[in-house]
Amino acid sequence: NAGVTQTPKFQVLKTGQSMTLQCAQDMNHNSMYWYRQDPGMGLRLIYYSASEGTTDKGEVPNGYNVSRLNKREFSLRLESAAPSQTSVYFCASSAQGPQSNQPQHFGDGTRLSIL
Amino acid sequence: QQPVQSPQAVILREGEDAVINCSSSKALYSVHWYRQKHGEAPVFLMILLKGGEQKGHEKISASFNEKKQQSSLYLTASQLSYSGTYFCGTDQGAQKLVFGQGTRLTINP
């Protein structure tokens, strides 16, 4: 049972380059999330998709775009990478949103460095 | 609003107890707790719902006081495997969780 799969696991970009982080879940979950994790900052929500066909901004959406391609897949795009976007990115999914009291399942993360 | 966790870090000897607190300035519907080991993904521990019901997971339990907008995680007779960073995620009424900054727990033999 794969759960939440993120690709790639590691990536180094130059400033100004673009890139798409991929995320797929095989648990038939409705809700999906993208977080970034920086030292001492915890997990900060970038974008989320409460259900297929919807996306909403989280706490730190600037510089990112997302696409909920179908129920399984939720991608995160950096159009013009900046050094401030160096971080570890986690994708997560849950059966429903937090008010349904369902846990979030996280992928293994993508470690992204921007030079 | 990001909840505040305290302490930021704690070091224990195996077998000792610890308490990690999570406080919010906004009303909460529920509190989720996760543990993350170094270099790994966060892993779900438990959800605390309104009503103050205490939930347990092995020797880890937690409480939720919705009037004070606070939750506490209790680790009893800590084991080496409990080492990691603990995060609370708060449901403030939107379709998302807002996580605290984390509490790093180190258990020494």
Image (cartoon, rainbow, N blue to C red):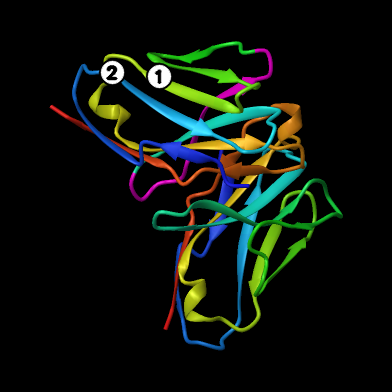
Percent coordinates x, y for residue A83 in the rendering:
47, 79
Residue kind at label 1, given as amino acid type = Tyr
Locate residue A90: give its quadrant.
bottom right
Residue B50 on the magenta span = yes
Where does residue A3 sit, x and y in percent of width and height?
58, 41
Mark 2 or mark 1, which is nearer the start of the sequence? 2
Q: Chain of mark 2?
A: B
Look at the picture and state if A86 lies above or below A54. below
- Above or below, comparing residue A12 to residue A32 in the picture: below
Label 1, on which residue? B74
What residue lies at 60% left-to-right and 21% top-to-bottom?
Answer: B48
Point out the stretch of residues depicted in magenta. Answer: B38-51
Q: Chain of mark 1?
A: B
Q: Are marks 1 and 2 on the same chain?
A: yes
Q: Which residue was labeled with disc 2? A: B17
- Please tell me how crowded label 2 is: few (under 14), some (14-19), or many (20+) other residues with Cα within 10 Å: some
Q: Is residue B22 visible?
A: yes
Q: Secondary structure at mark 1?
A: strand
Q: Name the residue located 56 percent from the left edge and 88 percent from the top edge.
A: A16
Instruction: Give neighbour class at mark 1: few <14, some 14-19, many 20+ (Cα, 10 Å).
Output: some
Q: Amino acid at mark 2?
A: Asp
> Pointers 1 and 2 in contact (CB under 8 A)?
yes
- Classify residue B24 by image quadrant: top right
Q: Is residue B20 or residue B69 the one in the foreground?
A: B69
Q: Is residue A30 left or right of residue B12?
A: right
Up-down relation of residue B63 to residue A109 (above or below) = above
Horizontally, residue A28 falls left or right of residue A41, namely right
